[in-house]
Image (tube, grey):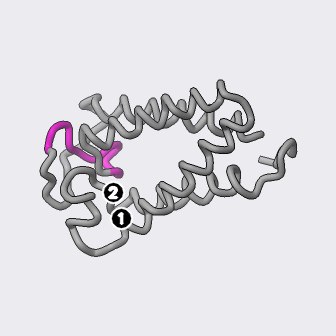
Amino acid sequence: MNSRIFVLVLGIVFLLVGVLGFVGPFVAPYSGPKLIVEKSQGDLLSLFPVNVLHDGVHILFGILGIAAFAAGEKGGRIFAQVVGVVYVALAVLGAVPLDLIRTVFGLIPIHDNDIWLHAVIGVVACYVGFAMPVGVEPAM
């Protein structure tokens, strides 16, 4: 898998997750701290806190991931680098035990199971974007 394939798969997954956040049967009642933006809030797959802004960010990252795939190897690496840095930062912010921080000022929930998921996505994306040798296909 090279960086282009990684960002294509990541983009498609982000897009699907963003859309699923708007589909009632996939979203359980929200169980986290109070949010200012309550529209479409809930726990996706009963695990991951989401709301309309969170779903919108996933859809945006999905579109950007697919566009990065189309842009070639350099576009894929840059997208992986951005996702890596942003998602590691989100994992750290989500772990801060202050509701104001772990909900991005009440706008987007990034706590609970989102912490480990953001950390895994961030670390893998950092590897693909920064450390994976160009032209080398890692074993998966």
| Helix, strand or loop for disc 1 | helix
**Labels in figure, total:** 2
Compared to 111, does 13 lie above or below? above
Q: Which secondary structure lies at badge 2?
A: loop
Find the residue positioned furthest to the top: 70
Image location (x, y in percent) of residue 21: 31, 35
Amino acid type of the residue tagged 2 in the rendering: Ile
Is tag 2's residue or tag 1's residue first in the polypeptide sequence?
1
Q: Which residue bears the numbered disc 2? A: 110
Q: Where, by quadrant of the figure, is residue 34 drawn?
A: bottom left
Residue 119 is covered by the magenta coloring = no
In the rendered structure, which amino acid carries the disc numbered 1?
A: Gly
Reply above or below: 126 against 76.
below
Q: CA distance from mark 2 to mark 1?
A: 5 Å
For image coordinates 24% across by 73% down, the residue present is 98
Residue at (15% x, 53% y) in the render: 35
Q: Nearer the viewer, residue 4 or 46?
A: 4
Residue 1 at x, y = what percent? 77, 40
Taking the spot 66% from the left edge, 28% from the top edge, the residue there is: 71
Residue contact between numbered discs 2 and 1, judged by CB atoms under 8 Å = yes
Main secondary structure found in the magenta portion: loop
Asked if the magenta segment contains residue 42, the reply would be yes
The segment highlighted magenta reads 38-48
Q: Circle 1: is it few (<14), some (14-19), or many (20+) Cα within 10 Å?
A: many
**Residue 39 place in picture, x, y as percent:** 15, 38
In this view, the residue in front, 68 or 120, is: 68
Position of residue 79 measured from the top left corner of the image (x, y, whole percent): 59, 42
Which residue is identified by label 1? 94
Occupied quadrant, residue 27: top left
Q: In this rendered view, identify the residue nearer to me: 89 or 1.
A: 89
35 in relation to 137, above or below: below
In the rendered image, the residue lying farthest to the right is: 136
